[in-house]
Amino acid sequence: MARYSAFLGRKVEVHYRAGDICLPASGVFVADSGRSIFLEQRFEQRGDQKTFRWEVPYQYIIRIDELPSESAGVRDPLLEKLSAEAAELNANSPDSKAKAAAAGGAVAAIPFVRGAKLA
């Protein structure tokens, strides 16, 4: 029975035992044989696409963590600029405050009182 099959196709970080030390390995979880898991990592070296695969037997696995996909962490400056412009246009529309009030929204910014002492 494949214990870790729920991770198939996902980017994971595996901590495994190698002698007396714990090593991390990250890559795409590509297979689970029932005795070992198989990770794959693709990279570019000197202009060529390379693939590195490795096997980690069940008895050496300490922990498996799912990592967020790379596309979730990558920000496109053009998309950020466009979304900021759209938010600004929506904030300036006459009925945006009425819509926010109807939705139960609070005031976007709370002004600080000058001279207030903080603990």
Image (cartoon, rainbow, N blue to C red):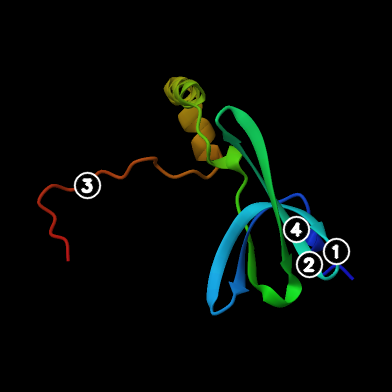
Quadrant assignment, res 108: top left
Q: How far across and how far down the image is residue 29, in percent? A: 73, 54
Quadrant assignment, res 48: top right
Q: Are marks 1 and 4 in contact (CB under 8 Å)?
A: yes
The quadrant of the image that shows the C terminus is bottom left
Quadrant assignment, res 55: bottom right
Outermost residue to the bottom: 20
Real-space CA distance between mark 3 and mark 1, rounded to the nearest whole angstrom: 60 Å
Real-space CA distance between mark 2 and mark 1, rounded to the nearest whole angstrom: 6 Å
Q: Earlier in the sequence, mark 3 or mark 1?
A: 1
Residue located beneath label 3 in the image: 112
Q: Residues within 10 Å of mark 3 (few under 14, many from 20)?
A: few
Residue at x-position 76% and y-position 63%: 37
Residue located beneath label 4 in the image: 38
Q: Residues within 10 Å of mark 4 (few under 14, many from 20)?
A: some
Disc 3 marks a residue whose amino acid type is Phe
Disc 4 marks a residue whose amino acid type is Phe
Q: Residues within 10 Å of mark 2 (few under 14, many from 20)?
A: some
Residue at x-position 61% and y-position 74%: 17
> Disc 3 vs disc 1: which is toward the camera?
1
Q: Are marks 2 and 4 in contact (CB under 8 Å)?
A: yes
Q: Nearer the viewer, residue 13 or 99?
A: 13
Residue 33 is marked as 1
Q: Earlier in the sequence, mark 3 or mark 2?
A: 2
